[in-house]
Each structure stands twice: as structure tokens, then as C-alpha cells.
Amino acid sequence: MRVGFVGLGRMGACMARNLARAGFDLTLWTRSLGKAHALAAELGCAVADSPRTLSDTVDVVVTMLADDPASRVVHFGPDGLFAGQRATRFVEMGTMSPYHLRALADAARSGVRIIDAPVSGATQAAAEAQLVIMAGCDAESAAPVQPLFDAMGKQTLYLGETGAGAVMKLAVNSLIHGINQTLAEAMTLAEAAGIAPEVAFDVIEASAACAPMLKYRRPLYLDEAGHDVTFTVALARKDMEVTVDLAHKLGTGMPQGLRTLAILKQAEAEGFGARDMAAILNYMRGKKS
């Protein structure tokens, strides 16, 4: 199976490495071709000069793109992925809206299958092939690309239809961003009473309230400046915008999500956009009642 990988950001580069290590014949493309060539030299794989060229030379295309607009640019147009004629499966692993995924499925040529397969897990999970994959299809439809999922993740959950994976990804991320905000508030409350941050986090980590993300993000919460960014405030804001829009279209209330989005927007406006989402703790430390 010849595999094309599009989107080599923090997550995508780790995922592409795991595909190469699993022995797949890999071709890369990303907007910054210098980044693609550097990774290709490391992995010993090829680089395409356009999405169309990549789609013309592989069987399956995996994309890890930031949002719907980025995906539209890559898929459509004379040099887009859909202009190629060879690839018959497109696996969309970034965080997209379900409406965009369905639009891709409608626009694909006859015989082409679009599978939304967003992932849960930060860059460490991506590097260690420990992602959870939420596939908008059944197990039978996923079978041709299951070896790719197995090379990148620890578990694949099948959600039945195109777009369902995207919905669950947004639902999971809304919970993650809500936990991130609530953790920031809990920590600042404890600190205001004189409890040291490390001690407060020890208690939270030992309590029933601790989620796995709090454990692996602990170093960032306690020393943001001393660690690499894994997921930015700007991306969290984007996630919540897409989620709130989906809730509105479905007629579902999301009052906490709206408040989380408002705080992310405020933090981004105050210069936190490029910082890790753990920076919301430092942002809340600067706020008074």
C-alpha cells in the first residue's frame, strides 16, 4: 500500500514517523515544503510537489490538518487532492466539522471513500503510537486502512457513518477544554488560600476529579515556560468555535462551552494564542473577581 501524508505539524510529523517505521511506502506533502523535505530525509521517503501529485501516486491519503478552511484548500482546486486520479481512500484525521466531512464525501469522485478518523491524545501519544482513533465508518469499511490506524494508535472506535467521528472528536475536545478551564480555576483558588501549586496539583491528581490529561499535562501546568507547546490556546479556541456552532445547528444547549469559548477568546486577545492551552492557568492567575 502506498500512503500519502498531508500536514506535518506537531501531531502529523509524529504520525508520519510511525507509518514509516511500520514499513509503509510513504510520500509527504505540507505547505512548508522545506519541512517535508527535512522529515523525508530523516525517514527515507518521498516528497510530492503538490497535493494533486501526491494523490496521483498513492493509494491512500492521510491528512492531519488544522481546520475546515485548511482542508478545503488542500482538497479542492486544480492542484488539490481531489484532482488526482489514483488514491481511492482519504483518511481525514484533523479536527473538522461533520458538515465539512460530508461535503468532502459528496465532492469525491465515484469509487472514492472518505473516512473521518480524528484522534484523541497529545503529541506524546502521537509519538508513541498511543492515539485513540474515532472512525466515521464501520469496522468492515475501515479494514483496508486498519493497518494504518494500528501503526498510529492504540485503539480504533467505529462510529458508523461519515461525520460521526468528527462529532465525537468535538464532544471529547469540549470536555477537555472545559476540564482545562476548571483546573485553572481550582488551582488559582487553592493558591489564593496559600497552598503551593505543586501540593494543590498532588491533591487534584490523587482525587476522583483527575482526568488522564491532567496527569500527562502536569509538567506544563506547573512549569509552562520550561516545556514545549503541545496544543495552543488558539487551536483550543478554534475547537470550541466549531463545537458551539455544531451545538447551535443541532439545537443543543452548551452554556459551559460558551463560557469556555469566551475565556479562550479573551486569553487569545491578550497574547496567549500561541502558548500551550495549559497557559490558561497563568491567564486565570491574573484575573480577579
Image: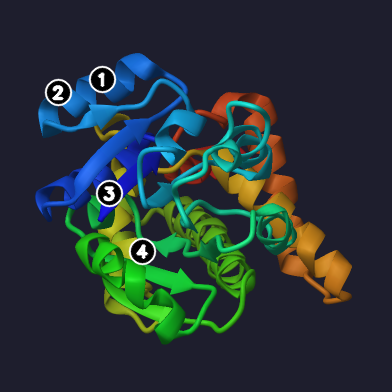
Q: Which of marks 3 and 4 is nearer the N terminus?
A: 3
Label number found at residue 2: 3
Look at discs 3 and 4 and give the one toward the viewer. Answer: 3
Q: List x then y, in percent, for residue 287.
A: 63, 40
Residues at discs 3 and 2 in contact (Cβ within 8 Å) = no
Q: What residue type is labelled 2?
A: Ala
Which residue in the protein does label 4 denote? 213
Residues at discs 1 and 2 in contact (Cβ within 8 Å) = yes
Which residue in the protein does label 1 denote? 37
Q: Which of marks 3 and 2 is nearer the N terminus?
A: 3
Residues at discs 1 and 3 in contact (Cβ within 8 Å) = no
Identified at 28% across, 62% down, the residue is 148
Q: Earlier in the sequence, mark 4 or mark 2?
A: 2
Q: Please, is residue 179 above or below residue 285 in the view? A: below
Q: Please, is residue 96 above or below residue 52 in the view? A: below
Look at discs 1 and 3 and give the one toward the viewer. Answer: 3
Q: How far apart are marks 3 and 4 (CA)?
A: 34 Å
Q: Please, is residue 4 above or below residue 154 in the view? A: above
Q: How far apart are marks 1 and 2 (CA)?
A: 6 Å
Q: Is residue 257 left or right of residue 189?
A: right
Q: Distance between the residues labelled 1 and 3?
A: 18 Å
Between residues 10 and 57, which one lies in front from this camera angle?
57
